[in-house]
Amino acid sequence: MNYFIELFKQSKSFSMFLLIVLVFMFGVYSEASGLIGEFLDTFDDWVYLLKQNVLIVLASGITASFLGIASGILMTRPWFKRYSEAFSQGFNILSAVPTLAILAIIMTITGIGFKSAFLGLVTVTILPVVRNTYQGISEVPDHMIEAARGQGMTDKQILWKVQIPNALYVISAGIRTGFALNVGTSPLITLIAADSLGEYIFTGIQLNEFNSLLIGSISVAALAIVTDFTLSKLQFWLLPKGVNPQRFT
Amino acid sequence: MIRLENLTKHFEVPGKAPVIAASNVSMEVGKGEICIFLGPSGCGKTTALKMINKLIPKTSGKIFIDETDIDDLDPITLRRKIGYVIQQIGLFPNMTIEENICVVPDLLKMDKKESRRKASELLEMVNLEPKIFLKRYPRELSGGQQQRIGVIRALAADPPLMLMDEPFGAIDPINREVIQDEFLKMNAELGKTVLFVSHDIDEAIKMGDKIAIFREGILEQCDTPDEILANPANSFIKEFVGTDRSLKRLKLINVIDAIMPFRMEVRAEDPLNKITKKMQDHNAHIAVVVGPRGRARGYITVEGIKGDIDGLVGDYIDHLPGTIHENDNLHDAVSQMYAHGTDWIPVVADDGTYKGYITQHTVASLLGEPPRKPGDKIG
C-alpha cells in the first residue's frame, strides 16, 4: 500500500493516468445514464441560462465591488469615524442573515425578476468587499501615515497615494470572496423568477431528474472555479508588484 | 536658523490634571548645527520635535525658522520644507525606492528628470548602487538599507532643516555605527541644520554639535557635548550621562589635537651622540625612527641606548607598539595603548607618515582641563 502512495506522490504521469481513467469512467457513466443525451437536447437552454447567469454575476459583482470599495473608504474618513463602528456592525449583522432570507425580503419590496435578483446578489457580494476595504485601509500602519503626513501630504493624498495602494491586496481578496459568494448564490435566484443555471437544479429536484440536477450543479461548480481562477489571475497581474504578496520573491 | 521660545505643550487628559509634555522650552540652533534632543522616554523630546513640523499642535510659545514664525505657514507647506525621518522608517511599500525618495519633490511638482537625477546622486552618497536599488521595492531591502533610504528621502527636496526622530534606534549596533558615520560625512558636505531625537548618550556625543537634555518636559541643559560631560548642570544630568563621563569625553577629542608638541623624529643613519643631546634638550626618552619617506619604522629609548654615543640609531631600533591614525579619537588611542601594554603610541597620517606621538600622561591631564573647543592644541 505504502508503495502505491509513494508511486502516486512521485509519478506525475501516474496521477495523470488516474485522472484520465476517472474522466473516462465519468464519460461512460454519463453516456449510460443519458446525461449527455439530455445535455445535448437542452443545449440551447443551457447556453441561454449560462449567459444569463454570467451576466447577472458580472453585473451585480462589479456594482457591488464599486459600491463596497466606496463605502469602505467612506467608513475610514475621519469625519465619518464615529459612525463607522455602527456601520460595520450593521454589515456584520447583514452578513449573518441567510442569503435565501435576503432574497425573500428583497422580493417583498421590489417584486420578482432580474431587478430583485440583481439587488439580492449585490447585497450578498458587497459585505466582504466593504469589510476588507475598511480593514485594509485601517490596517495601514500608523507610522507609515505619520511619515506621509510628516512629508507634507494632505489627507486626500495620504488616502490615494498611501492608504489605498497598500490596502489593494486586502481589498482584492474581499472582491474574490464576494464573487465566490455571488456565484454560489446565483442558482437561488431562480426561486424569484430570474434566469440562472439554478433552473436545471430546481427542475431536477422537483421532477426527481438526476441528469438535469447534475448538469446544473456541475455547470455552476465550473462557473465558480472559472470565476475564481480568472480573478486570481487578475489579482496577480493587476496589483502593483510592491503590494502583491503573490509576486514577492 | 531655528529658535524655540517658551514652547509649551499640555496634553488634556479627561478627568485628570493635564500632562505637561513641554514646559517653556527656549533654545536656539544655528545653521548647519546638529542638535540632539536627549532624555529618558516620556521626557517630551519627541513632542518638542513634532511641534516644529506641526504634527503635534503646540499649546503656547513660538517657533521661528529663519526668523519666520511657523504660525504664519500652513502645515502642508511647512512640512514640505522640512525633512522628516522616523524610527520606523515608514517607506511606502507600494512605491519603488526611486518613487519613495522623490515623494516630496513630486508633491512640490518639481521637475521629474531633475529629481530622479538627484535621487541617484543621493543613493550614491549612502553607498547604495543606484542601478540596483532605484527600481527595487522597500521590502527587498535590509533594515539598514531602508533607513538609509529614509534619510535620503528627507533630503530629496533639499530642505534646510531636518527633523529626525530616533532615526537609527531600530538598527543593529554595527550597522548603526556605519550609518551614523555616513550621515555625519554626508551632512558635513550638505550643511543641513538637524534636530535629532535620541535616548542614547553615546549617539548624542558622537553626532551632536549641541545636546539638549530634557526631563519631564523641561529643558535641563543645552550645550556642547564636551561642556555637558565636563560640567553637568545638575545631579540628574550627571546621572544621565553616566559615571564614565570622563571616558566618554575621550571620544570627543581627536588624536591630532593631543599630539605632543615636539616630535622626536630620527633616521636610522643618524649618529647617536647628536640624537642623545636632542632628546636631553626636550626631556624626551623616546624617539621614533622614520624611513626615507617619513614612515614610522621603530623607536629608540634613552635606556635602550645605554649611554652609547659612538654608534648609529639603526643599531638600537625596537618594534613600534602599534600606531594610531591622526583622525581617530583619544578613546581609540587609549584602547590601543592598553591593548599593547604601553604608555605611548605614535600617530600616523593616511599615507603612514609619522606625525608625532601621544602619551597616557597627556591624555590624563587633558581630561582634568576645562572643556576644549575643536581645534585646540596642547599648549
Image (cartoon, coloured by chain):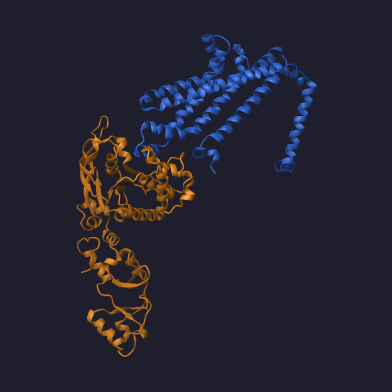
The picture places residue A170, in percent across and down from the top left corner, at 50, 32
Whether residue B343 is visible to the viewer of this picture, yes or no, is no
Supply the letter of whichever chain is blue: A
- Rendered-image quadrant of the C terminus of chain A: top right
Residue B163 in view (yes/no): yes
Could you tell whether B91 is left or right of B311 in the image?
right
Q: Quadrant of residue B276?
A: bottom left
All told, the count of numbered labels is 0
Decide: is B176 above or below B71: below
Q: Is residue B169 left or right of residue B237?
A: right
Q: Quarter of the image for the N terminus of chain A: give it.
A: top right
Could you tell me residue B237's position as x and y percent? 23, 52
Q: Single out the residue that lies furthest toward the bottom.
A: B310
Tell me what residue is drawn at x 57 percent, y 22 percent: A58
Q: Nearer the viewer, residue B58 or B366?
A: B58
Q: Position of residue B344 (x, y in %)?
A: 31, 73
Q: Image check: A32 left or right of B340? A: right
At 53% across and 20% down in the image, what residue appears? A124
Q: Is residue A79 above or below residue A148?
A: above
- What tint does the image give chain B? orange
Q: Quadrant of residue B22?
A: top left
Where is residue A62? Give x, y as percent.
53, 23
